[in-house]
Amino acid sequence: MKILVLGAGRMGHGAVFDLIHNSPSVERVTVADFDFAKAEAVAAAVGTDRIDARQIDASNYADIVELFRGHDSVISCVNYWYNVSLSKAAIEVGANFCDLGGNNYIVDEQLALDAEAKAAGINIIPDCGLAPGMVSILAMHGATRFDSVDEIHIRVGGLPQDPQPPLNYQLVFSVEGLINEYLEIARVIRGGKITEVDSMTEIESLSFDGFPPLEAFQTSGGTSTLPDTFLGSIRELDYKTIRYAGHCEKFKTMMDLGLCSSEEIMVDFQKVKPRKVFGELLQQHLPADGPDYVLVRLDFVGLKDGETKKLRFDIVDKQDEATGMSAMMRTTAFPASIIAQMMASGDVIARGATPQEEAIDPEKFVAEIARRNIKIVESL
């Protein structure tokens, strides 16, 4: 099979690495970026003649259509606002498509293309990174252990191994994606109904063995399509982001001061958007690319054989020193690569534009992440 990766940033690099080094069915990979030098650098870093580097502008629909031709699947690692037009290009060409998502409204537009995707005989599967992404499939994986599920609570975070003040955080993906998940509304199920909750609220403490005090708080996007999928069959479902304790209060103070606003203000007789300035400052002052951890926890409560049972999935992943793949690259890009390959091989439950928890066989997916040494620890 031949796979195209759009975007040569951290996650694009991770996807290309997985396709080449962990995926025997993949014959060729194309990596494309607006900055051709970045695409070439990824190809050189992965180190094989089975990679083609290309230059592409994701906003140029005609060029995107031509680039998609001849590929069995496309993985989008570019900003989420391109994903609707990229999905349409995939339908036009007949190539399967998945992305790293990050915005519920964009995902809704993609899923509205279901009839067209079915007619083209392809899959469009949004939100295929970590969270949203892998955790959606793990939620379905855990739910199948019960006769009925009452609660699913999802907690996920990417953390630096060497946290530095003031935020004890490092940039592990797009700063736009970070601001977006802190700013927009979170969708949860409360009392059996879909409810919207403000992000950066409902802070709770939690612990993982060997880690200092941690906190988790509401953020947007992490539940993705899970509230719609589980509506009517579950009483409680939510998602919170894990950080080192104290992070939420500090970041929210800056948000409350308006630093994440997209409304223009006048500064020295020039119009500026605070969000753009804040994003640039975060990129300049926060560390990036240091050794990291990814923590994942899913807690389930449900009925099994007439009794109330509990189940917990924990993942603690860290940067792979041998390959240079960060924990965030492994747990975000590798799942997208797995799904792209499953689509290309026809190894999905149904064609169309479909949420991953409905399209992907959880047993097969979990076997693939285990093969990549992403370990799920189960406890009751």
Image (cartoon, helix red, strand yellow):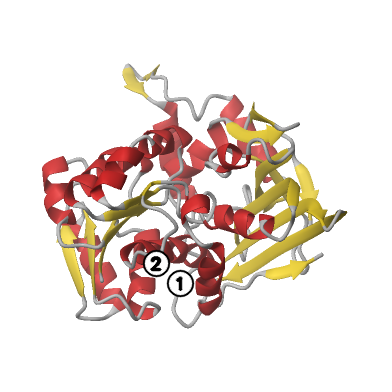
Quarter where residue 293 is shown: bottom right
Q: Identify the image quadrant of the C terminus.
A: bottom right
- In the displayed structure image, the side of residue 161 where residue 173 appears, left or right: left
x and y, in percent, of residue 43 in the image? 25, 72
Q: How many marks?
A: 2
Q: Front-most of 195 and 329? A: 195
Q: Which mark is residue 251?
A: none
Q: Front-most of 201 and 347? A: 347
Look at the image and tell me whether residue 330 can be seen: yes
x and y, in percent, of residue 51 in the image? 22, 73
- Per the image, the residue denoted by label 2 is 14
Kindly check if marks 2 and 1 are in contact, taking CB atoms under 8 A apart as contact: yes
The type of residue carrying mark 2 is Gly
- Per the image, the residue denoted by label 1 is 325
- In the displayed structure image, the side of residue 173 where residue 121 appears, left or right: left
Residue at image position (31%, 20%) is: 270
The type of residue carrying mark 1 is Met
Circle 1 Cα neighbour tier, 10 Å, few/some/many (<14 / 14–19 / ≥20):
many
SS at mark 1 in the image: loop
